[in-house]
Image (cartoon, rainbow, N blue to C red):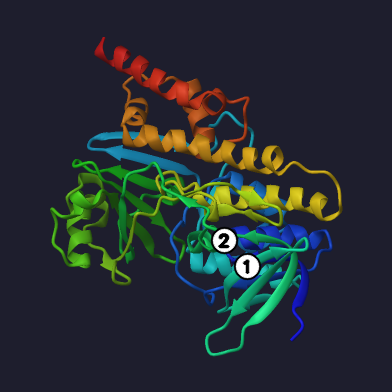
Amino acid sequence: MKPTEVDVLIIGAGPAGSTAAALLRQQGFQLLVVEKQVFPRFVIGESLLPHSMDLLREAGLLEAIQARGFMQKFGALFLRGNQACGFDFSDQFTSGWQYAYQVPRADFDLALADAVEARGVPVLYGRQVTAVEFRDGRACAAIEQPGKAIDNVRARFVLDCSGYGRVLPRLLSLEEPTRFPTREALFTHVTHDRRPLGREEGKIWVCIHPDGAWIWIIPFSNGKTSVGVVATPEFFRHYPAEPQAQLRAALMSDPNAGARLANVQFAFPPQRISGYACAVKKLFGPQFALVGNATEFLDPIFSSGVTLALASASRAAQVLTRHLRGQPVDWQTEYSDFVMQGINTFRACVNAWYDTSLHDVFFAAHRDPDIMKQLCSVLAGYVWDRNNPCVSQLERVLPLLARIVQGRDRK
C-alpha cells in the first residue's frame, strides 16, 4: 500500500499538538495528527497561566476555549500554617493577560482538537506511532491501530507533541536522567469543598504541608475541584496504604487544606504518578522536533506544563514554516535555545521551591512590592520577558532575595 504523504506528521493531539496544527494549517501545509488515546480523556495539568491566553489567541483557538465557560483564574494563594502569600495577575511586572482558566483537561484538550479538526486537519484517535525512520530527507512512520493493518506515513517533518508518551525520545534513544529526585503525585477530583467567594474563588491554592509535601487545590466551574498531594515516596509511607485513605489522611493533616476539604467527596478513586520528571539529550534533528512535555517535564508546582507546551508549539510552527519553504533556519538558536529559556526559568523556580529559599521570599514579613510584581509575571508564564530581572537573572536573584529577606526579618 502506498504511504500517506503529508508535509508534517504531528504525534499527539494535546495542547501542543493542536496548537502546532492550528498554526501550520494557517500556512497551508498538509498535516496529519495521530493520537494514541481516544478523546475526551483524563489528564492532570489543569491550571493555566495567563501567557497561555496570548498563545491560544495567536493560534486562533482562544474563542473555542472561552466558549466552554471555564473557571477564571486570577492568581494564586500560597499557604504555610498561618502564613499566606497571594499573587494577583492584575499586579505584575510584564504587560499581559490578567487571568487564565482552571480547566478539566478532558474538556479543554477536546475543545482544542475539535477546533483543529473543524479547520480540515485530520486527527486519527486510537492510533500509535510505533516506528520512525529518516531517509531521503523524509520521515517514514509506522502507525498501528489495535487489530488493524499497519499504516505507513511519509512526512517532510515530524513534530513529537506526545507529552508523557514521549514517542520519539523513546524510539530514538533521546532520553536522559533528570536531575530532580523522585517525587509522587496522588490526586483526584472532589465535590463540596469550601470555596472562597468572589474573585478569590478561582485562584489556585498551594498548601505547604508541615512534613514537607505540598497540596494543590484547583476549582472548576462544573462544581468539582482538583486536589493532589506531591511528595517524596517516604512522605506517603506515613499514611494508610489504601490510596483513598492515604490521600484523605494527607489532606486532613494540613491545617489549610484540611479546613477547606473537610467534607469533600471523591469523584473517582485517587490516581498516582511517580517519577514524572524527565529530560532529553536534544530537542530537534534533521526532520523532527520535540514539543511540549516531550522535551522536558519539571514538576507540577507552578503549573508550567501547558504554557511551555503552547509556547514551544508556537515557536516550532514558526521555525518549521520557514524550514519547509526552503528558507535558512537555525533550529538551535531559534527553537532549542528559546524553549530552554522558558524551561530553565521555571527550573530555577522549582529548585528554589524545594530548597525552600522561595518559601523565604514568599512568606517574608517585609516583602518588596517590585520584586513580588516581577515574581508574579514569572508565575503568570511570562518567562521569556528578559526585561524582568526575575527572568534574566533568576538563578542568581532568588538565593540573594532569600538572604535579604531573612536578614530583614531577623531585625
Residue count near mark 1 (Cα–Cα under 10 Å), binned few <14, some 14–19, many ≥20 = some
Image quadrant holding the C terminus, namely top left
Residue type (three-letter) at the residue carrying disc 1: Val
Q: Nearer the viewer, residue 163 or 147?
A: 147
Q: Nearer the viewer, residue 212 or 102?
A: 212
Secondary element under disc 1, as helix, strand or loop, is strand
- x and y percentages locating residue 167 in the rendered image: 54, 64
Secondary element under disc 2, as helix, strand or loop, is helix
Q: Is residue 77 above or below residue 193?
A: above
Horizontal side of 315 relative to 127 (left or right) equals right
Horizontal side of 376 relative to 8 (left or right) equals left
Residue at the (22%, 62%) spot, across then down: 263
- x and y percentages locating residue 354 in the rendered image: 33, 37
Image quadrant holding the N terminus, namely bottom right
Q: Is residue 232 above or below residue 399?
A: below
Q: Residue furthest top?
A: 411
Horizontal side of 310 relative to 371 (left or right) equals right
Residue type (three-letter) at the residue carrying disc 2: Leu
Q: Is residue 237 above or below residue 370?
A: below
Residue at the (53%, 53%) spot, across then down: 174
Residue at the (19%, 42%) spot, across then down: 211
Mark 2, residue position: 168
Residue 132's tag is: 1
Measure how far apart labels 1 and 2 are at the Cα level: 8 Å
Residue 400 quadrant: top left
Q: Nearer the viewer, residue 386 or 233?
A: 233
Q: Earlier in the sequence, mark 1 or mark 2?
A: 1
